[in-house]
Image (cartoon, coloured by chain):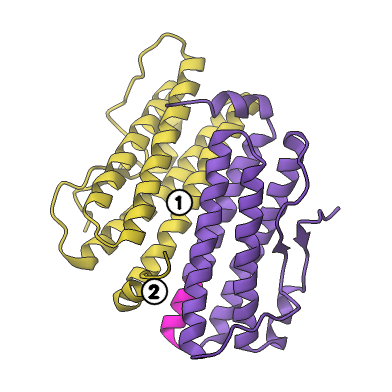
Chain colours: A yellow, B purple
């Protein structure tokens, strides 16, 4: 079941149906959604080690939004960002409900992994569309970063499945 | 050319030549080396965005060391950690020299990527050796984390290759 925090969106193949301006708008919207998702998730997590990691992800998505807005500004000077109604791939939304126990967190992490994985592919898709080497490079940067997030989440997810060990191992060191 | 901060070590296939105790000792030593490498690299970097990311990596490796020590303590209670002279895969060492320009940073990032990639494979190798599901899970955790580092580094590395854009794009936000 898809939780309310995740909208599955259009398949990746639909990238070709949108202009670059629309795709950048979607990407900015997705980064904002991901940041708010992680912020609201972190607020609901009590295990300090995991909370910090999720807050870190929120901060990273905020930086990506800033980078994308800068790129948008350079490509469409003076224009307001247009946010299309549609979006490619899963879009994360703020967690508004109360979470009950670790299973709720595990489920949300699983969906966040899916969103990060497809975000990485989405940026790879935009890389093929932009023409200058500079912009391609920026898309590879974002794609690699999201892939890094995917593995960070996968690591935590995997350990969370054994909650007893997680809580035991994560109370380590200062 | 291999820089002084990196010792290439033994090939992965040699994992089978060592006991689990020795492998954990190697892993702890490698995490310490990586942390010191990132700490000393961060001290030599002036671009705030990159410095922060490298400092974050240093902190992560410190947490991995603590986790591994805890696992070691559980498996070999009361025993001092034995650090074998050999190590599997590249081992990072502190950066002791002065860096000259972005090319030096790029070179070190490239070696760090290699070290992270092989660290991920090294933990996968140990996963096959440990018997309990709990310990396998912990090895998958570390493997995924190092893979996450690899992609984080690859993203920065790729963007650093275009220094003009890097310095321009990274001066974003507050």
Asked whether, in this view, residue A78 is left or right of residue A96, the answer is right
Q: Quadrant of the C terminus of chain A?
A: bottom left
Tell which of A164 and B14 is nearer to you.
A164
Mark number, residue A169? 2
Residue A103: x and y, percent?
23, 67
SS under mark 2? helix
Task: Report the front residue among A134 and B139.
Answer: B139
Residue A136 percent location from the top left of the image:
60, 31
Q: Quick check: can you spot residue B131?
A: no
Q: How crowded is mark 1: few (under 14 residues within 10 Å), some or many (20 or more)?
A: many
Secondary element type, mark 1? helix
Is B68 displayed left or right of A38 in the figure? right
- Residue A149's mark? 1
What residue sits 71% from the left and 81% below the top? B84
Give the residue furthest to the top: A78
The percent position of residue A90, horizontal first and vertical second, equals: 33, 45
Chain identifier of the residue bearing label 2 in the image? A
Q: Does residue B62 appear in this view? A: yes
Q: Is residue B133 magenta?
A: yes
Circle number at residue A56: none
Looking at the image, residue A140 lies above or below residue B62:
above
Residue at figure coordinates x 57%, y 51% from the top left: B151
Q: Is the magenta stretch mostly helix, strand or loop?
A: helix
Tag in front: 2 or 1:
2
Write the start and end of the magenta stretch as one range: B131-140
The residue carrying pointer 2 sits among few (fewer than 14), some (14 to 19) or many (20 or more) residues within 10 Å by Cα, namely some
Q: Which residue is drawn at 50% across and 58% down?
A: B60
The mark that comes first in sequence, 2 or 1, is 1
């Amino acid at each position: 079941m898809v939780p309310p925090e995740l909208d599955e969106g259009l398949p990746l193949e639909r990238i070709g149906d949108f202009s670059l301006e629309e795709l950048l708008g979607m990407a900015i919207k997705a980064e904002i959604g991901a940041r708010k998702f992680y912020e609201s998730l972190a607020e609901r997590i009590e295990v300090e080690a995991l909370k910090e990691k999720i807050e870190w992800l929120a901060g990273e998505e905020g930086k990506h939004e800033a980078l994308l807005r800068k790129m948008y500004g350079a490509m469409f000077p003076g224009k307001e960002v247009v946010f299309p109604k549609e979006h490619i791939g899963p879009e994360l939304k703020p967690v508004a409900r109360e979470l009950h126990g670790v299973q709720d967190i595990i489920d949300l992490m699983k969906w966040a992994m899916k969103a990060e994985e497809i975000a990485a592919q989405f940026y790879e898709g935009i890389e093929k569309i932009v023409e200058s080497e500079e912009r391609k490079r920026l898309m590879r940067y974002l794609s690699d970063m999201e892939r890094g997030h995917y593995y960070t989440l996968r690591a935590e997810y995997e350990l969370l499945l054994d909650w007893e060990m997680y809580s035991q191992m994560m109370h380590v060191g200062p």
